[in-house]
Image (cartoon, rainbow, N blue to C red):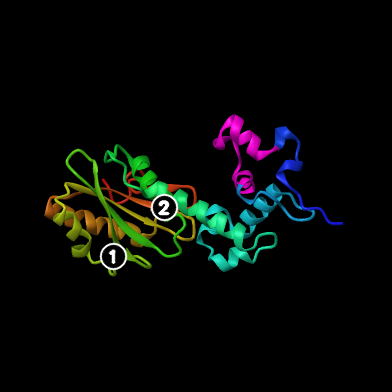
Amino acid sequence: MSTQYRIADLPAAERPRERLRQQGAQSLSTAELLAVLLRTGVPGESAVRLGERLLGHFGGLAGLQRADFAEVQSQHGLGEAKAATLKAAIELGRRLAVQEPGERPAISGPADAAALVQYEMAGLEQEHLRAILLDTRNKVIAIEEVSQGTLNSAQVRIAELFKAAIRRNAAALILVHNHPSGDPTPSADDIALTRQVREAGRLLEIEVLDHLIIGQGRYVSLKEQKLAFG
């Protein structure tokens, strides 16, 4: 008879659920966190191995986030209930990452800005350009969507980019967009767009502090790289 591999069948010290309780969720690998959600594996494959297979198939957690429900459900060992559990958990993480805190965060550097958007934007299938609007103390006023699709300086309407900043009386802004390929290396168009936006900002007296490009698990700050800033 075939056996369904369960977390409970593992030695106590190796059970992800036990380690989560004793050491905290941060001590678990991504595959082990998925195993806690999946609960059981399939014949010949533990829940942890199933989690590893899913991550390999979808190209990591961001790929699993991007995949539609039917594709996740079709994977061997899942089905509707487990696919729904995974999708719900990922969506909860996304909402936690983008929810507005009671106290508006202040941006002191690129890492602060990236932390606001990286979880969600790393999983987007198209390029999205957003503007993080800041007040005179660099506290976040809002994050505004500017455009969607492949970006270059000819396609982005600079007036539209600054419209929300003017309406909300922003003192400064940070541009941020994602590269769906996962590689955040700036392109020539990214650099040209940044220069154009900075020049418009000077005329409007709205400082453009940085332009971040979000990739898979990392980001690039054009200001730190001294690209279009100097």
Label 2 Cα crowd, 10 Å radius (few <14 / some 14-19 / many 20+): many
Q: Count every numbered label the image shows and give the total.
A: 2
Q: Position of residue 6 (x, y in %)?
A: 73, 47
Q: Which residue is mark 2?
A: 214
Residue type at the position of mark 1: Ser
State the residue at coordinates (36%, 46%).
116
Q: Is residue 4 above or below residue 68?
A: above
In the image: residue 143, left or right of residue 24: left
Q: Secondary structure at mark 1?
A: loop
Magenta residues span 15-36
Classify residue 138 by image quadrant. Answer: top left
In the image: residue 211, left or right of residue 36: left
Q: Quadrant of the C terminus?
A: top left
Is-magenta flag for residue 31?
Answer: yes
Q: Which residue is mark 1?
A: 153
The one nearer the camera, 192 or 144, is: 144
Q: Quadrant of the N terminus?
A: bottom right
Q: Position of residue 176 (x, y in %)?
A: 33, 53
Residue found at the far right of this picture: 1
State the residue at coordinates (31%, 57%).
130
In the image: residue 58, left or right of residue 205: right
Is-magenta flag for residue 121?
Answer: no
Q: Secondary structure at mark 2?
A: strand
Q: Position of residue 194 (x, y in %)?
A: 28, 56
Residue found at the far top of this picture: 22
Q: Earlier in the sequence, mark 2 or mark 1?
A: 1
Q: Main secondary structure of the magenta part?
A: helix
In the image: residue 220, left or right of residue 223: right
Residue type at the position of mark 2: Ile
State the residue at coordinates (46%, 64%).
125
Q: Position of residue 144 (x, y in %)?
A: 27, 56
Label 1 Cα crowd, 10 Å radius (few <14 / some 14-19 / many 20+): some
